[in-house]
Amino acid sequence: MPPAEIWIDGLVQSCIYMTMAFGMVLVFSILGILNWAHGQFYMLGAFVVYYAITAAGIPFPISLLISGVVVGGLGMLVEKFVIERLTSPGYGMLYVTVATLALMFFFEGAAGMAFGLMDKGLSTVLPGVLDLGSFSVSYQKIAVIIFTLVIMISMYIVLNRTKVGLAIRAAAQEPVAASLYGISVGRVSLIVMGIGCALAAMAGGIMAPVYTTNPFMGRIPMIMSLLAIIIGGLGSLTGAIVGGIILGFLNSVIAYHLSYVSEFVLFLLVIIILLVRPQGLFGAPLK
Amino acid sequence: MPYFDYKTLIPRTVIGVLIALFVIIPVFTTNVITISIFISSGIWAIAVMGFVLILRTGQFSMGQAAFMALGAYTSAILTIKLGMPFWPSFLLAGIVSGIIALIIGLVVLRVGGIYFSIITLAFGEVVRIFAQQMEGITRGARGLIPPMPPTIVLGGFEINFAAGPVPYYYFMILLVAITAVVFWRIDRSRMGGTFSSMAANQILAEHQGIHLMKYRVIAFTIAGVFTGFAGAYYANFLSIITPLMFGLWQSIQIMMMSIVGGISSIVGGALIGATILYTLGIYLSRLPIFNIQYLLFGAAVVLVLLFLPKGTGLVDLWGKFWHKVFREPEEYEMPEESEMAVE
């Protein structure tokens, strides 16, 4: 058995992958595309939080919200000016995929130019550890866990108890019928892209004190949350959450036992799961 | 009957002159950097052609760089560890890469679409991690140094690969030409038609009696063979192989090259896309502002996608251009008034 710290670390990682995978699945279920630049929104969110705290002196929770709003707006712009223009009928998924891949380079380059390539630490936020006898947990990690719970509950409320949520669910299920009932699918995609990017940004912001912030920090969480939604089943929100939990714990627990082979095991596991059950754990059967 | 059809003759002449220009480039300049850029873009073009061939069947592979890595490592390990001569090991590089593509294809191509992309992505990462960690065979991140091709004596000529990049350049042209002819013939053949029908409507194609899996595996294997050659040659030209040369980001670059060049033409689009993006990447990385190359590279790809008509690549401008130049005025015969009056 790995020590408790490893399990805590797994929990923190699964929280982040869960939040990001949730946003990605939400975008996928409405727009029908995988947003490859999702990890870069995570990175930008971390930078917004870093500068809001160090340069402007805004308290941590409010700067988290600011990063959600700013990066969510950026995501909406991307949807409006890039994705929407490339998803009109007759284009196929390929062009959007390549466009979001190119945006990934674009945002990394922009962040590298604007903020520099140095690692930026934010360890002054929420210092100290909670001593639990045999092991201890830093307050930053507790903040990540609480934040994820809050986000998940509020997303549950938004999706199930509000009119916007109803519109999103309807548009995900049957876009044509939804538009016949007066739901503007274009506006829903805009909102969903904003929510997805804001989730990624806030995940990045909450992780800024735990790890360091640099322009390339988004790559690994992006790949991991991608694998999480593939394991959980594309288009399934439950699948995204379960996949995120599985991958987060696998990443830390396997790494504890096998050190560098863990990545290898992870990718092999994904290949095997896809071969045995291509629709993922919670996805609808393939047509 | 000799028939002077200027509409096809002039574009063909222009293409022929361009090809001839590329063949005699070493006459004008033997600048190592220029020639090297052309060699590398030619090699990437081969990989891009393989990607487009798979794309023709409606699948997109996100692990094409892994096959370059397989080819490169096979060739280098055979020559260094087993003492095999260069040319047999070069041939074996393509064959081994093709066999692995066949096995992977047989296992993986059952699931199509986005799942295939993700599995190939994972496969590419598995190959990279494998190359990084098996230090006994691949020397890990320190990299393998493949030996040079031996001097060839052909009649009175002596082709010495150690002398400079020019022999590499001509061998690259030979390799690209072979790949281009093979892929072009496949694209024009009945099999090419089958590929496009599968991409256009998978269900209809299956109901017409097309064995989807079989043709997907064929395309994947052929692409694997040629990508393996490209990888082996690339490693040999750069005289170093490290695992990070053929990672996920290189696979993404192959995708971008194919889209920017245009996927309507399997050869032209690949050549244009690979040359432009590779050259752009090299020149951008020389700019004094740090990290600006990523920004401009991404921006260039997005702009090409947004502003070219219907999101197609650069190669389609060619057809549009000739269509504009030679567009015949459309003639409508107006019915005469008297006839109209009679009716």
Image (cartoon, coloured by chain):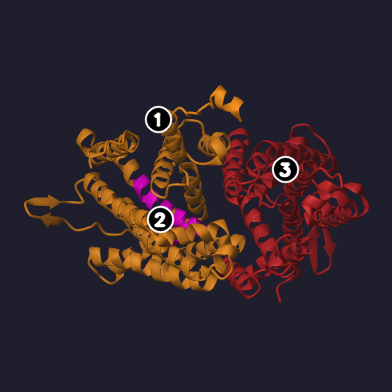
Kindly report the secondary structure that dominates the magenta region of the rendered protein: helix
Q: Amino acid at mark 2?
A: Asp
Q: For marks 2 and 1, give the one nearer the viewer.
A: 1
Instruction: State whether discs 2 and 3 lie on one chain.
Output: no
Which residue occupies 25% across, 49% down? B168
Crowd band around label 3 with a 10 angstrom C-alpha radius: few (<14), some (14–19), many (20+): many
Q: Amino acid at mark 1?
A: Phe
Task: Identify the chain of the residue marked 3, using the numbered disc in the image.
Answer: A
Q: Residue furthest left?
A: B156
Instruction: State whether discs 2 and 1 lie on one chain.
Output: yes
Residue A121 horizontal side relative to residue A271, left or right: right
Q: Secondary structure at mark 3?
A: helix
Cα gap from disc 2 to disc 3, whole angstroms = 46 Å
Q: Which mark is residue A45?
A: 3
Whether residue A117 is visible, yes or no, is: no
Mark 1, residue position: B326
In the image, the segment drawn in magenta is B40-67
Q: Secondary structure at mark 1?
A: loop
Mark 2, residue position: B187
Q: Earlier in the sequence, mark 2 or mark 1?
A: 2
Q: How many marks?
A: 3
Front position in the image: B326 or B166: B326
